[in-house]
Image (spheres, grey):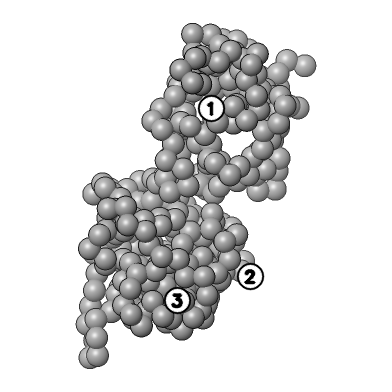
């Protein structure tokens, strides 16, 4: 059986001295993967160069710390947009994806810069992907993109825990802490249901004080969408009658409420958290803050987008600042 190879061009320096493939430990190999992003450079099949399909040109493979990976990005393929686990041991790398497992034999060779050969075990049809090293990997806060109409959105809820100036955003680990921050009018975030295991799929939930904080929740080059930009997203997604299906993810929704995710938005049902720290609609709603404020008869409120089970003429609502919801970003 002829095993196919995925070739990733790698360069690794340790203590200023280049390490040979013979001296690399498993830990060093893992470090090599997560230090950088890797962009597709070429395809090979049976040792011969192949044309690179247009739909994969410029896509990047990203290995993350703590044994998580994103596949080729930016991508409208939802399987690429959800992080999945991977482990590396002596001579093998295994990926644990939704409903399937893929194991590769790997070998690192120093050939004017390190090359990583990944041979998919049990599959002779896979082509060889040739990657080149791209920019440094920013870790779990990195932003992945999806083009929807003429807007570029993040394709997942953000996991940011610092403002743009570097100041930390304090985590609420209990209902009492969440309520206390709201009463003081201070920014905070929490995991859905206060469960850190929800971190990677659902991102963080933020109160509106974090959204409007002048230190900036969005990194440079990005901003929190306005109500007008959310309306444009709804229009491109087919209008209020179709937006639930086209923007909702195909996984994690309760009772067959999932969408088609046809635009790659990957709307996840993280629900929301009330002013007193109680969680609602986890698994049943995707709630996303906008940067637009409005005023009713009592006090200012924030506008937010709802993806749920209902096809109504409304998808944008207003809420008190003390509530917590997910945040997406749109490129400047």
Residue shown at the point (33%, 80%) measured from the top left: 184
Looking at the image, the residue that sits furthest to the bottom is 297
Left or right of 299 on screen, residue 308: right
Where, by quadrant of the figure, is residue 47 drawn?
A: top right
Q: Position of residue 195 (x, y in %)?
A: 58, 66
Q: Is residue 267 visible?
A: no
Task: Answer above or below: position of 80 versus 32.
Answer: below
User: Dot 3: few (<14), some (14–19), or many (≥20) neighbours within 10 Å?
Assistant: many
Q: Residue at x 66, y 37 (%)?
A: 87
- Image x and y of residue 280, in percent: 52, 78
Q: CA distance from mark 2 to mark 3?
A: 29 Å
Query: What residue lies at 46% left-to-right and 31% top-to-bottom?
Result: 36
Residue 136 x %, y %: 41, 33
Task: Tell which tag, 2 or 1, sits nearer the viewer.
Answer: 1
Judging by the rendered image, the residue that carries numbered circle 1 is: 32
- Under tag 1, what secondary structure? helix
Quarter of the figure that contains the N terminus: top right
CA distance for labels 2 and 1: 42 Å
In this figure, which residue is indicated by the disc labeled 3?
Answer: 178
Q: Nearer the viewer, residue 255 or 205?
A: 205
Marks 2/3 in contact by CB < 8 Å: the verdict is no
**Element type at marker 2?**
loop
């Amino acid at each position: 059986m002829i095993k196919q190879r995925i070739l990733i061009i790698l360069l690794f320096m340790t203590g200023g001295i280049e390490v040979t493939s013979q001296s690399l430990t498993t830990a060093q190999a893992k470090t090599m993967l997560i230090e950088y992003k890797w962009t597709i450079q070429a395809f090979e099949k049976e040792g011969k160069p192949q044309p690179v399909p247009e739909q994969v040109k410029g896509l990047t493979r990203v290995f993350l710390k703590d044994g998580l990976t994103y596949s080729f990005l930016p991508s409208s393929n939802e399987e690429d947009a959800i992080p999945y686990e991977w482990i590396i041991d002596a001579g093998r790398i295994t990926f644990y994806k939704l409903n399937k497992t893929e194991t590769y034999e790997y070998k690192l060779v120093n050939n004017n810069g390190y090359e990583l050969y990944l041979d998919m075990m049990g599959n002779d049809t896979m082509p060889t992907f040739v990657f080149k090293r791209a920019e440094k990997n920013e870790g779990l806060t990195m932003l992945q993109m999806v083009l929807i109409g003429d807007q570029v959105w993040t394709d997942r809820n953000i996991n940011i825990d610092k403002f743009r100036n570097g100041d930390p955003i304090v985590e609420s680990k209990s209902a009492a802490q969440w309520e206390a921050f709201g009463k003081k009018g201070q920014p905070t975030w929490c995991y859905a249901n206060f469960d850190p295991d929800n971190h990677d799929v659902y991102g963080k939930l933020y109160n509106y004080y974090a959204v409007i904080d002048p230190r900036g929740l969005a990194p440079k080059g990005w901003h929190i969408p306005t109500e007008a930009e959310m309306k444009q997203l709804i229009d491109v997604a087919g209008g209020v009658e179709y937006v639930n299906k086209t923007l909702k993810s195909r996984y994690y929704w309760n009772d067959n409420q999932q969408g088609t995710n046809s635009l790659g938005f990957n709307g996840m049902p993280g629900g929301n958290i009330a002013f007193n720290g109680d969680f609602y609609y986890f698994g049943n709603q995707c709630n996303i803050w906008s940067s637009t404020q409005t005023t009713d008869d009592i006090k200012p409120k924030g506008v937010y987008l709802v993806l749920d089970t209902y096809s109504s003429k409304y998808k944008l609502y207003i809420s008190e600042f003390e509530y917590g919801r997910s945040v997406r970003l749109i490129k400047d």
